[in-house]
Amino acid sequence: MKLGGGSSEFFVVTAVLFEENDDASKCDERINLIRTELGLSEHFEFHFSKCSKAIRRNFLEKVAAFDFFYFAVVLNKPKLYSPGFQLKESLVKYTAKLVFENAKPHLRDAIVVVDASGSKDFRNQLSTYLKRQVNDDRGHGLIKKVKTSRSDGNNLVQLADMVSGAIWRSFKHQDASYRRLVSHRELRVQVWPE
């Protein structure tokens, strides 16, 4: 929730959805090939804030051809008023819930992979929270499983980061050039609070 001192007033959480495992596998393979084409190490992590403009553009242009969609929530931090948002864990959980609320019509026994940041306790809390908030009263239907994966070893978590960065930049710097590269994959980007 820091504001000022170089911290952004926007906090973005993005979910990238693949309807078929085969589509996700093909995109994953293509991301490996992007590293080779750019002469990058096979361990290079695509992280929007750490990539050059050329790498960002190349990555987003190449993945745009794959069959995925995305939802995002952009928290407008200066407009948040509840003291609960001062806690990082509460902020992340609530924002993730908003993303999955928007994605509900597209979820059926989904396997959700979340970046393995934060403590193990927090990751377990997030998993339980999302399933409780998004699934039906009997606890099933939309989210089958929540797994965590370190972003440096998961191309599709890196895809979500790159899309999230493109969205963030469109708000922070009013520069939608990266976001436009994947805009045909966008199902909803909600700004909250408006």
Image (cartoon, rainbow, N blue to C red):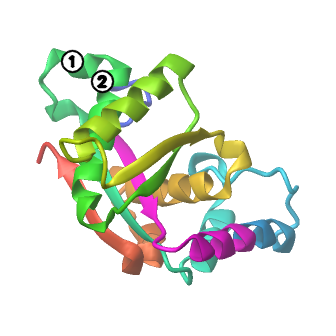
Magenta stretch encompasses residue 17: yes
Q: CA distance from mark 2 to mark 1?
A: 6 Å
Disc 1 is placed on an element classified as helix
Q: Position of residue 125 (x, y in %)?
A: 40, 24
Provide residue 141's location: percent of width, then percent of height: 30, 54
Q: Residue furthest front?
A: 138
Which residue was labeled with disc 1? Answer: 84
- Judged left or right of residue 181, residue 154 is right
Residue at x-position 85% and y-position 60%: 40
Residue type beneath disc 1 = Gly
Magenta range is 10-30
* Residue 78 percent location from the top left of the image: 20, 31
Q: Disc 2 residue type?
A: Ser
In this rendering, position of residue 101 left or right of residue 165: left
Q: Considering only vertical position in the picture, is 78 above or below 49?
A: above
| Quarter of the picture holding the N terminus | top left
Circles 2, 1 touching at the beta carbon (< 8 Å) = yes
The residue at 63%/78% (across/down) is: 62
Q: In the rendered structure, does residue 89 fall within the stretch colored magenta?
A: no
- Asked which quadrant contains residue 38, the reply is bottom right
Residue 27's image quarter?
A: bottom right
x then y, percent, for residue 50: 65, 47
Q: Is residue 90 visible?
A: yes
Residue 148's place in the image compared with 4, above or below, is below
**Nearer to me, 107 or 54:** 107
Label 2: which residue?
90
Q: Can residue 1 be spotted in the picture?
A: no
